[in-house]
Amino acid sequence: MTGTIHIVDDEETIRDALSFLFASRGVQAQGWPSGEAFLAALPHGDCDCLILDVRMAGLSGTEVFDRLRAADFRAPVIFLTGHADVPVAVQSLKAGAFDFVEKPFNDNLIVERAFEAIARHRAAAAEADTRRDIASRLATLSAREDEVMHLMLQGHLNKQIAETLGIAIRTVEVHRSRILSKTGVRNAMELARLVGEFRPLA
Amino acid sequence: MTGTIHIVDDEETIRDALSFLFASRGVQAQGWPSGEAFLAALPHGDCDCLILDVRMAGLSGTEVFDRLRAADFRAPVIFLTGHADVPVAVQSLKAGAFDFVEKPFNDNLIVERAFEAIARHRAAAAEADTRRDIASRLATLSAREDEVMHLMLQGHLNKQIAETLGIAIRTVEVHRSRILSKTGVRNAMELARLVGEFRPLA
DNA sequence: CCGTCTATTGCGGAAACCCACAATAGCGCC
DNA sequence: GGCGCTATTGTGGGTTTCCGCAATAGACGG
């Protein structure tokens, strides 16, 4: 497993222990003594997983989490907590946190959770790439082409689309051809697959 | 809001208070004094939401939850807990519980959570219905028809499918026609939409 | 004004799709 | 054996799709 884990905890012993633990597992780790310090650096691209303590001087873990979400931070967040607090745990999980681990924690457990979080993050990033690619292709379509595409995807014949839009069949054919060309597919079925991957066919 | 909520808690005062609260909001409620009693009755179809206490004599709430999941019980489960226990809360949520509420709870909060759970349950049930309908249609296809359908959905021409399967084009046309007829769609595009709703196009 | 792009349209020919009508063969079940 | 179902195939005719070639009109920006 490779990747980079960031650890935000105001207890230096925890930061160092976790950094050493992850380094021994082949993962890079960087510690931050406060939420403020981490937010000031905010390494979007160079963070595969964030381990975040709940209770800290200054900004609390949950406050940091709120700011990260507002900043569209996508890496998975594993909370550490030394004091049980069910509502905070429940709310954070429902808000998208990856996990909640109590201190003192088992080394194997924290590593396993972190590695799973990284794997999930990787998969989600790949899917986001695909969606971005498809979106950029669809963005090249003119308004009319977009209109024709939706009718195509609903299974309408060219003559039906022509009637609906009040244009000639030949015009529909031209739009169809340009849609397929711009999106890089060979036929309407491939287009359906492309758009289906992007979002549910509406 | 209509529906039926079941409440499992060994404290009679809690059961009665919640039953009364929900009845006053137009929702039917039924109380059970133990997990064992609820599991013995196990009202699959007549349960839109289950409110389940964590700490009970006999089977605990989480033990009941495990058994419900093993029994393919689909209604959303809201846990009540009077003693904070973060690992239990985290584990239950990750296992699919809808929410975790601490006692003593605010009436409005519990009602709001329950109503949202019911709404989610309804939406999920409707989606499951759609998937079941589609599955039953696809189940009517013969092995050969299924084979042809997949090639169709990949955008292959009839002549290509014929070559791939080593059969005549006319045979491919016959299979196509039967596939559309059996699935109740008008053309290949509608078929793609149907299958796309069922599962991602592979 | 000129160039670029989109939207629109027509003609004619080729390819692809669709299907009624008809038939044979194989398999499984009663 | 008879029946029902699936798989397969052919013929001929109609419909739909596709596209090269060609052209006009409008909007926008330099």
Image: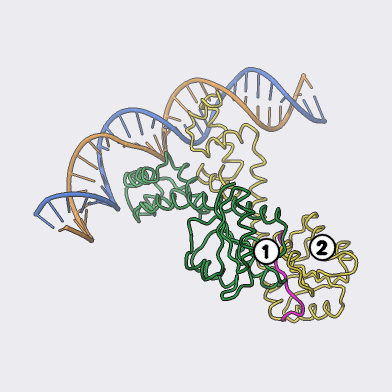
Chain colours: A yellow, B green, C orange, D blue
Label 1 CA crowd tier, 10 Å (few <14, some 14–19, many 20+): many
Residue B100's mark?
Answer: 1
Label 2 CA crowd tier, 10 Å (few <14, some 14–19, many 20+): few
In magenta, the rendered stretch is A95-106
* SS majority, magenta: loop
Relative to A5, say whether B136 is above or below. above
Which of these two is toward me, B120 or B162?
B120
Q: Position of residue A14 (x, y in %)?
A: 82, 78
Q: Position of residue B71 (x, y in %)?
A: 48, 66
Amino acid type at mark 2: Pro
Q: Is residue A152 left or right of residue B22?
A: left
Chain letter of mark 2 equals A
Q: Are marks 1 and 2 on the same chain?
A: no
Q: Position of residue C10 (x, y in %)?
A: 50, 20
Q: Is residue B191 left or right of residue A34?
A: left
> Does residue A143 appear anywhere in the picture?
yes
Which of these two is toward me, B67 or A148?
B67
Q: Is residue A123 left or right of residue C27?
A: right
Residue A104: in magenta span? yes
Q: Nearer the viewer, mark 1 or mark 2?
A: 1
Residue in the picture at 56% in, 61% down: B31
> Does residue A114 appear anywhere in the picture?
no
Amino acid type at mark 1: Phe
Q: Say which quarter of the image contains residue D11.
A: top left
Q: Is residue D22 left or right of residue B191?
A: right
